[in-house]
Image (cartoon, helix red, strand yellow):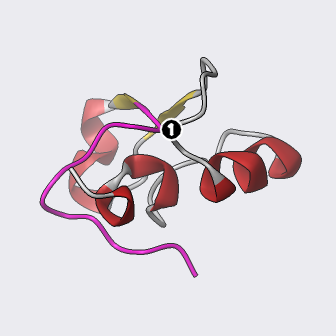
Amino acid sequence: MSERSLCGTCQHFGSDLPEETLVQVRVNPEADRPEVSTCGMPSNARLHLRVSATSSCDAYSPAA
């Protein structure tokens, strides 16, 4: 799995994390930390899916 496809670097990850934490996750999503966030991808919204920064899926969109 490449770093580019990790949930921690996806635009759908982190809406429920503090901004400072999200920045740290985006800088190094593979760091040893327990952050888990909801997946904000519209098709997953009804599932209330929780993912770690190192999760990944086929709907990955790079964070802006």
Q: Would residue 9 appear left or right of 43 to someone viewing this image?
A: right
Residue neighbourhood size for the residue with mark 1, other residues' Cα within 10 Å, grouped as few (<14), some (14–19), many (≥20): some
Near-viewer residue (42 or 27): 27
Task: Provide residue 3's location: percent of width, then percent of height.
Answer: 38, 57
**Extreme-bottom residue of the structure:** 64
Task: Provide residue 37's location: percent of width, then percent of height.
Answer: 53, 33
The quadrant holding residue 52 is: top left
Magenta stretch secondary structure, dominant: loop
Task: Provide residue 20's location: percent of width, then percent of height.
Answer: 87, 48
Task: Provide residue 38's location: percent of width, then percent of height.
Answer: 47, 36
Q: Would residue 17 appear left or right of 10 to someone viewing this image?
A: right
* Image position of 12 with respect to 33: above or below: below
Q: Would residue 23 appear left or right of 28 to someone viewing this image?
A: right
Q: Secondary structure at mark 1?
A: loop
**Extreme-right residue of the structure:** 20
Queried whether the magenta region covers residue 58, the answer comes back as: yes
Tell me the amino acid under the disc marked 1: Glu
Q: Quadrant of the C terminus?
A: bottom right
Residue drawn at x 12%, y 60% is 58
Near-viewer residue (12 or 7): 7
Q: What is the span of residues highlighted in magenta in the rendered image?
A: 52-64
Instruction: List the residue tagged with mark 1.
Output: 30
* Image position of 57 with respect to 62: above or below: above
* Image position of 4 with respect to 24: above or below: below
Q: Would residue 8 appear left or right of 4 to someone viewing this image?
A: right
